[in-house]
Image (tube, grey):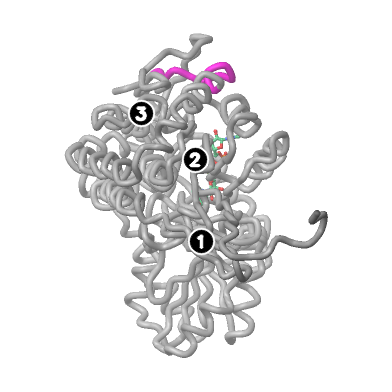
Amino acid sequence: MQTKLFIGGEFVDALGGETLPVLNPHDGSELAQIALAGRADVDRAVDAACAAADGWANTPAAERGRYLGKLADAIDAAADELARLESTDTGHPVRDSEALDVPRTAATFRYFAGMADKVEGSVIPAERGFLNYLLRGPVGVVGQIVPWNFPLMFCGWKLGPALAAGNTVVMKPSELTPLSSLRLAELMGAVGIPPGVVNIVPGLGETAGAAIAEHPDIAKVSFTGSTATGRKVVEASAGNLKRLQLELGGKGANIVFDDADLTAAVNGSAFAIFHNQGQACIAGSRLLLHERIAAEFTERFVTLAESIRIGDPLDPNTEMGPLTSALHRDRVLAYVKVALDDDAQILTGGGSPPGRADLDLGYYIAPTVVWADPASRVCREEVFGPFVTISTFHDEDEVVETANGTDYGLGGGLWTRDLSRAHRMARRLRTGMVWVNSYKRVSPASPFGGVGRSGYGREMGFEAMHEYTEPKSVWVNVDADLPPWYWR
Ligand code: NAD
């Protein structure tokens, strides 16, 4: 298990010699002591990224793509090991890590491997007599700050487009879950990605994270995390007016109309909230049910929630693991009290999995379903756990108002057999992503991001390449008269 900082192609201790324990969320045991980057380590990493910047930017695009393709192959070859490492560190059930996290990470690197030599400029009919064309070059040294909920997958989402476009990177994984990104650093070295192109510095947010956000030699920061921290990153970035890309919190509305296929909607809605223990920015955490199907849906949904197999994430039969940290488990449980104070009704869950003393040392919460007024706090604030609210609606206008009634605007879903309504609703929901008769689909080819307090900018797809390139407009006088001013 790699535990040191990855700077300039080498694994090194933190300059201050500091370390931090990484805990197993299944039982609280110590997995490793990791080197903890301080400000001086971020400086070292930025120096390494600056030193590598010209070389990487001038590496032929197709060759950059080949490195990313080799990295994708290396991830596939190490898939079992990476899946177990990710599950041990985060609590993701290993069946999820094997089927989703690891293959999606490889697929993302592969997608951007193919994208590297397809970053095209354009010719613009700006003015007669001029050839005006747009070049797209790298932004420079990019800082990437990552949360703990999908640490490996976010490496793909962030490193893939940044490297394809010719940027060099200083990445700070969450101090809670740094192990898979450090293993990825080993794989990057093994496939020959030059030293300094990617530097990985696990550290605390208020030191290493803040140092990245403030750093004068970092041209852009891509941040994924909470809205509150995103705001701090915006403030810290003001010194050198960094470009920012913010992927922040969410409060996804998941709307079920009375003509929906209820079996599909019940199953899909369970995936929408309970996958990864609800620790997903796009989680469908607000179920909005048409009043005609609300009773039947709720009964079937609660029955399903109570049947979810909870346990050791490394057991292939486990469908739901622990939350990633004790602190976060307590934060989620505090919302049970908030719900009760607002007269919500707990339909199931609300505490540790019942009758499971074997899980007492871990950070487990039973799937929690709450009947609540859509105006109450639990229906407006992000809980980020296996905690879903249910409310009812009467008609389309009412549900659009409720769905759009939070500060967030990341993902949302709807279940209906009415094609016109599906498209109409997709347009009316104020979100960056909408799923119809499905929820939480992601693809390297499809732009991912939000509006409002869910942030700005997009990961993945062609949009991501625009995030990581700087456009330059070039004017060439081919056959134009020069303007008469000062003409002698
Ligand atoms: P967080 O905001 O606490 O931390 C995110 C990252 O920022 C961590 O690496 C942390 O160390 C760092 N950080 C903390 N303080 C910092 C500071 N002052 N300056 C710079 N960096 C700092 O979030 P979290 O608890 O790790 O993750 C959960 C949040 O992330 C949720 O709100 C969730 O919705 C959001 N999230 C959003 C997306 C998305 O794509 N929109 C994806 C996943 C998670």
Helix, strand, or loop for circle 2?
loop
Q: Position of residue 458 (x, y in %)?
A: 51, 56
Q: Mark 1: give few (<14), some (14-19) or many (20+) Cα within 10 Å.
A: many
Nearer mark to the viewer, of 3 and 1: 3
Residue tagged 2: 147
Range of residues picked out in magenta: 33-42
Q: Magenta stretch: residue 36 in it?
A: yes
Residue 250 lies, with reference to residue 85, above or below; the image says below
**Distance of label 2 from label 3 (alpha carbons):** 15 Å
Q: Position of residue 132 (x, y in %)?
A: 56, 61
Helix, strand, or loop for circle 3?
helix
**Distance of label 1 from label 2 (alpha carbons):** 19 Å
- Is ligand 1 less than 8 Å from the beta carbon at label 2? yes
Residue tagged 3: 182
Residue 63 lies, with reference to residue 483, above or below; the image says above
Quadrant where the C terminus sits is bottom right
Q: Mark 2: give few (<14), some (14-19) or many (20+) Cα within 10 Å.
A: some
Q: Is label 1 in contact with label 2 (beta carbons under 8 Å)?
A: no
The count of marks equals 3
Residue 338 at least partly seen:
yes
Is 78 positioned to the left or the right of 403 in the image? left
| Ligand 1: image quarter | top right
Residue type at mark 1? Answer: Ser
Nearer mark to the viewer, of 2 and 3: 3
Residue tagged 1: 285
At x 36%, y 41%, the residue is: 152
